[in-house]
Amino acid sequence: MKQIIKKGSFFTLMFLLLGCLSLYAADNDLITRQITINLEKAGTLPNRIASSRKYKITNLKIIGEINGTDLKMIRDMAGRTAESNSTDGKLSVLDLSEAKIVEGGDYYYNDNYSNNNYYTSNDVIGSYAFYCCSGLTSLTLPAGFTEIGSFAFQGCSGLTSLTLPAGITKIGENAFSGCSGLTSLTLPAGITRIGDSAFSGCSGLTSLTLPAGITSIDYAAFFGCSGLTSLTLPAGITKIGSFAFQGCSGLTSLALPAGITKIGENAFYGCSGLTSLTLPAGITKIGENAFYGCSGLTSLTLPAGITSIGSYAFRGCSGLTSIYVYAEKVPKIGRDEFTGVDAKKCTLYVPMGTCDDYLISDFGNYFENIVEFDATGIDKTTTSTDVEEVGRYSVNGQRLSAPTKGLNIVKYSDGSVKKVAVR
């Protein structure tokens, strides 16, 4: 009897084991080597891959012309139908470096909300082309195309590697929104515009190279890019749009080129890690909430041409200890402009002969210490922790522990010495 039980147990165990292995093999029967398909005619990709195999391919290279029918198939293989429903597709690596996008064929995407169908155009990565294909990890795009459409890569959260070829001139709105897996991206020369929310939510992006020729950073372009630590903007940019860098809490350094005249509302809202910022002299207006919550800033310098500072622009900048204003005419400021700045700890420095003007203006509501300084010949703006006051003396050489009424001699960490009149 025991012998029979043992034999029965053995066969049961073998049956279960073989069953598990069979299921494991079925689930892992993937084609992992690169499959290269040379299309002699656009629209024929569905004819080249058997329906039983299209969800097994993980690495695909296509040579030749592709149209909407082919792109629809590619989306299917990458886990999303044209209606953005999930599939069993496992395509993660796609090489289109020797492909060419042409018009024609079926629609590749249908917008359920507007019921609009999207078709391919010559040399364009169209709107929603790879929308929500979160399984893609690497994508090499074809040469020769000029435009990336709106929402083209939105939601491609698995994408860690993307090569953009030369010749692109425009990146549409939300083009890379939600690509949280991207860690670095180089934009080729020739791009003149980055659309609204183009990189919003790219929280993994730590490095980004922007080419010369860009004239505007549009609305919410880098909203929520919390991993971005340093960004250099090229010359020629004249405007930083609203919400452009909101939530970029990892940003510690940002160089703004000459020529910028306006910083939009909420542009740097919540950039709590920002400690160094260079503002060009041409800025005349700072929008509402522009630097709200930038608690890491310790020193701020406003340019001579500044005429308007929006409400809440520096609210919550609790780390500020000194603010230098080079404008001889008191700028117009909004409500709660400096709420959260320590009135006792932070000193407001203003041009010689303007102390009373600033004292009786709205600035006087926020600062107890308003000190005049020699702003003659100064025509640049720097918000930085690099230059700090290191010593203060009376005209007789006596060391002063705080600003004292009369003429003070102030030494700074960069070696400069200035005479400051304190009233």
Image (cartoon, grey):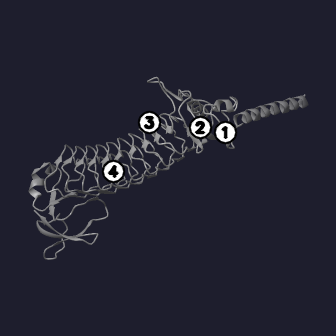
Q: In the structure shown, which secondary structural element does the residue marked by tag 4 occupy?
A: loop
Q: CA distance from mark 1 to mark 4?
A: 43 Å
Q: CA distance from mark 4 to mark 2?
A: 37 Å
Q: In the structure shown, which secondary structural element does the residue marked by tag 1 occupy?
A: strand
Instruction: Name the amino acid type tagged 3.
Output: Ser
Q: At which x and y percent is residue 301?
A: 24, 57
Figure check: 369 above or below 7: below
Instruction: Name the amino acid type tagged 4.
Output: Ile
Q: Earlier in the sequence, mark 4 or mark 3?
A: 3
Residue tagged 4: 237
Quadrant where the C terminus sits is bottom left
Q: CA distance from mark 3 to mark 2?
A: 22 Å
Question: How many numbered marks have been drawn onto this rendered protein structure?
Answer: 4
Q: Earlier in the sequence, mark 4 or mark 2?
A: 2
Residue tagged 2: 65
Instruction: Name the amino acid type tagged 2.
Output: Glu
Circle 3 packing at 10 Å, graded few (<14), some (14-19), many (20+), is many
Q: Earlier in the sequence, mark 3 or mark 2?
A: 2
Circle number at residue 37: 1
Figure check: 34 above or below 121: below
Circle 2 packing at 10 Å, graded few (<14), some (14-19), many (20+), is many
In this rendering, the label closer to the viewer, 1 or 3: 1
Circle 1 packing at 10 Å, graded few (<14), some (14-19), many (20+), is some
Q: Earlier in the sequence, mark 2 or mark 1?
A: 1
Figure check: 327 above or below 167: below
Q: In the structure shown, which secondary structural element does the residue marked by tag 2 occupy?
A: strand
In this rendering, the label closer to the viewer, 1 or 4: 1
Q: Earlier in the sequence, mark 1 or mark 4?
A: 1
Residue tagged 3: 150
Circle 4 packing at 10 Å, graded few (<14), some (14-19), many (20+), is many
Q: CA distance from mark 2 to mark 1?
A: 11 Å
What residue do we see at 50% from left, 38% from top? Answer: 125
